[in-house]
Amino acid sequence: MAATVLWVRRDLRLRDHPALREAAAAGGKVLPLFVLDPRLADEATPRRDHLLASLRSLDDAIDGALVVRRGRPEQVVAQVAREAGADSVHTTAESTPYGRARDGRVRRRLERDGLSLVATGTPYAVGPGTLLKADGTAYQVFTPFSRAWRDHGWPGPAPMPRGLRWARTVDSEGIPDGRDVEGAGEESARRRWKRFLDQHLGDYDAERDRPDLDTTSRMSVPLKFGELHPRTLLADIASHAAARSQAARTFVSELCWREFYADVLWHHPTSAWADLKPALSSMEYSEPGAGLEAWQKGETGYPMVDAGMRQLLAEGWMHNRVRMITASFLVKDLHIWWPYGARHFLAHLRDGDIASNSHGWQWVAGTGTDAAPYFRVFNPVTQGLKFDPDGEYVRRWVPELRHVSGRAAHEPWGRDDGYAEGYPERIVDHRAEREEALRRYQAARG
């Protein structure tokens, strides 16, 4: 009997996988395929390293049955389907502008060969584009979207298909070599998630903004690669002892933000790299130059900003509170247009997701979904004092300040020996740049 092709992308797991269930239900064996698209696979990024490590983990879990081919998806998928003698190709529905265009090309190519592309499920609890306001238009404000999202609900995790058999009739080019990445793959993600549920969910509301503590879930990376499905997380929270706590509700809201941004991008695909709202289209921005470079390297002279940017370069990850602080500094203190920062984040983040990244940046910049953001300018010093109260996070990532104890690490200019180990002085004066940011925003608003 011919095999059915399962084309995996952002769903590198076996549990809670609707497309896998549909492929298995089609009859016969399932041939799992991953296409290394040169447009994405040739990027030397932490995200690529994690992808390759996650593919190795998936291949191990299915006893080496994963077929990996390199090339244009519309050509590779059709070729593998022919080699497998498949009648159909199953996959998880895509929602990003690039993914939708790619899938359209693959579908048209398969149809020319008399085959079908069957898209099942979504990387989200509620598929982007599903929820609309009463007047039939899309949501652009989070709170009403979140109410509609909760009211709509979602199905429980999809069970594993019974009697699943893997096809081994098609050659694989193998998974390219890459750096070892700790924590990649479905099983590692499940262990991290269980540890968070058992040890930190109950304190999430109080500790989620503390980058000095390793108490957040760090589920953004497994969700990015589909090593876990958000439905699984929501089901586990619902059955947890702390399900009715404020901490659990706050965590669920964070999952909802991810779904909200994906929905916004579905309805407004140009917002990936352009302002969602045109009200600030006349904003005066500064040319990127030495300021952008200092920000990228973590050499701005503001400890909380520099700690975050250095963590990004070292780990391919950054705490969400620090993402907001560093983004605000680039846009509001250096007056640089947000896509410069968004592209830098995408180049280095393992969890780099176009919807969450670009719309998170626009939330800070005031050009996205937030209703009245023009006056929000994060003070990097007071933010550091509040959310890294003992300076531990700063000293962890800025070795030039390890001799400065306690809260003073956030204000080295206040100590005689603050610059003794070579930490750079501030490249701008925050108070002056805040006033300049407000002036530019008011001018742009007319």
Image (spheres, grey):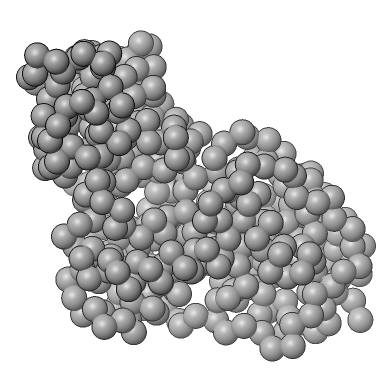
In the displayed structure image, the side of residue 346 where residue 400 appears, left or right = left
**Above or below — where is 155 with respect to 55?**
below
**Above or below — where is 5 with respect to 374?**
below
In the image, 402 versus 197, the foreground residue is 402
In the image, 339 versus 144, the foreground residue is 339
- Residue 365 at x, y percent in the picture: 26, 34
- Residue 202 at x, y percent in the picture: 22, 70
In the image, 20 versus 403, the foreground residue is 403
Q: How many labels were placed on the picture?
A: 0
**Above or below — where is 240 with respect to 56?**
below
In the displayed structure image, the side of residue 39 where residue 79 appears, left or right = right
Quarter of the image with the C terminus in it: top left
- Residue 317 at x, y percent in the picture: 41, 43
**Residue 373 seen in render:** no
**Residue 14 seen in render:** yes
In the displayed structure image, the side of residue 341 where residue 418 appears, left or right = left
Q: Residue at x 47, y 54 (%)?
A: 221
- Residue 418 at x, y percent in the picture: 16, 18
- In the picture as drawn, the residue positioned furthest to the front comes out as 403
Q: Residue at x 12, y 42 (%)?
A: 389
Quarter of the image with the N terminus in it: bottom right
Q: Residue at x 12, y 35 (%)?
A: 406
Q: Quadrant of residue 360?
A: top left
In the displayed structure image, the side of residue 308 where residue 29 appears, left or right = right
Q: Residue at x 31, y 57 (%)?
A: 216
